[in-house]
Amino acid sequence: MNGPLLEVKRLQVAYAGNQALDVAGLRVQRGEVVGVVGANGAGKSTLVNALAGWSRGEPTVGGEVSLAGRRIDGWAPHERIRAGLALVPEGRLVFSRMTVEDNLSTAFAPVAAEGRRIYSRDEIYMLFPRLKERRGHLGSQLSGGERQMLGIGRALMMGPQLLLLDEPSIGLAPQLVAQVLQTLRTLAAAGLTILLVEQNVRAAIEVVDRLVLLERGRVVLEGPAATMGSDPRIAQAYLGAHA
């Protein structure tokens, strides 16, 4: 199918009349890994939550969100999941009182006829061997990195067309950050489209195709990751470099 997998137009989110997000336009092409970066409070989580149709509060949301050419704004979160949009929130999408094995057994599985890649539990274990080692452990007994792997695994078993990840590196040791993000590159090489929200710009820029910079809820800069690292607004504020 031609056209972007995800297209956003005039997406606005406000809480109690206070504007938190105002994105005029955003596109993600099929098979692309796009990183959304910015400081705390820039609107990164608000963006992916709005795309997923979910929020901790009661925001006013406006604008258009299209997935594979279909308008999904106004749809309930579970309807967006069934359409192929899966979010791994900062909370990791893990049931703490269930084992790893049970967490992976309860993931919603779409019908194969939808033409999406549906990962089996064995394939998740191949992607994340540590989960297989810990398959009898409760979610509450896992480390932060293991919970992140499990959250991604559960999302993959839903057969997403588009995988949204909110701060997957937060709280992880550097070696685990590299492992998780490189796994995303493996998934992209297999055809998965990914929108990655990440405060660790240095790590994100190594794995994404394109970088989008949010400031105060607005897109202020975007471009190929290969060139964005040398832009003064990225280099000075997020990479600790001098212009």
Image (tube, grey):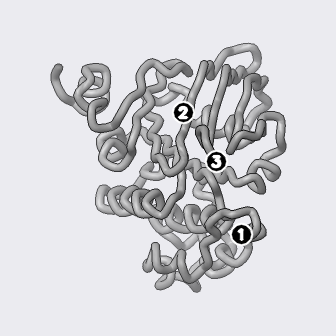
Residue holding disc 1: 107
- For residue 93, above or below residue 197: below
Instruction: Give the image quarter of residue 234.
Output: top left
User: x and y percent of residue 209 in the render?
Assistant: 38, 43
Q: Quadrant of the C terminus?
A: top left
User: x and y percent of residue 11 in the render?
Assistant: 67, 24
Which residue type carries mark 3?
Answer: Met
User: x and y percent of residue 133 in the render?
Assistant: 47, 85
Q: Are marks 2 and 1 in contact (CB under 8 Å)?
A: no
Circle on res. 52:
none
- For residue 47, above or below residue 11: below
Circle on res. 44:
2
Nearest to N terminus: mark 3 or mark 1? 3
Q: Residues within 10 Å of mark 2 (few under 14, many from 20)?
A: many
Nearest to N terminus: mark 3 or mark 2? 3
Q: Residues within 10 Å of mark 3 (few under 14, many from 20)?
A: few
SS under mark 2: helix
Residue shown at the point (61%, 33%) measured from the top left: 47
SS under mark 1: loop
Q: Residues within 10 Å of mark 1 (few under 14, many from 20)?
A: some
Quick one: 102 or 4, which is closer to the camera?
Answer: 4
SS under mark 3: loop
Nearest to N terminus: mark 2 or mark 1? 2
Measure the alpha-carbon separation of dots 3 and 1: 27 Å
Residue shown at the point (58%, 36%) measured from the top left: 45
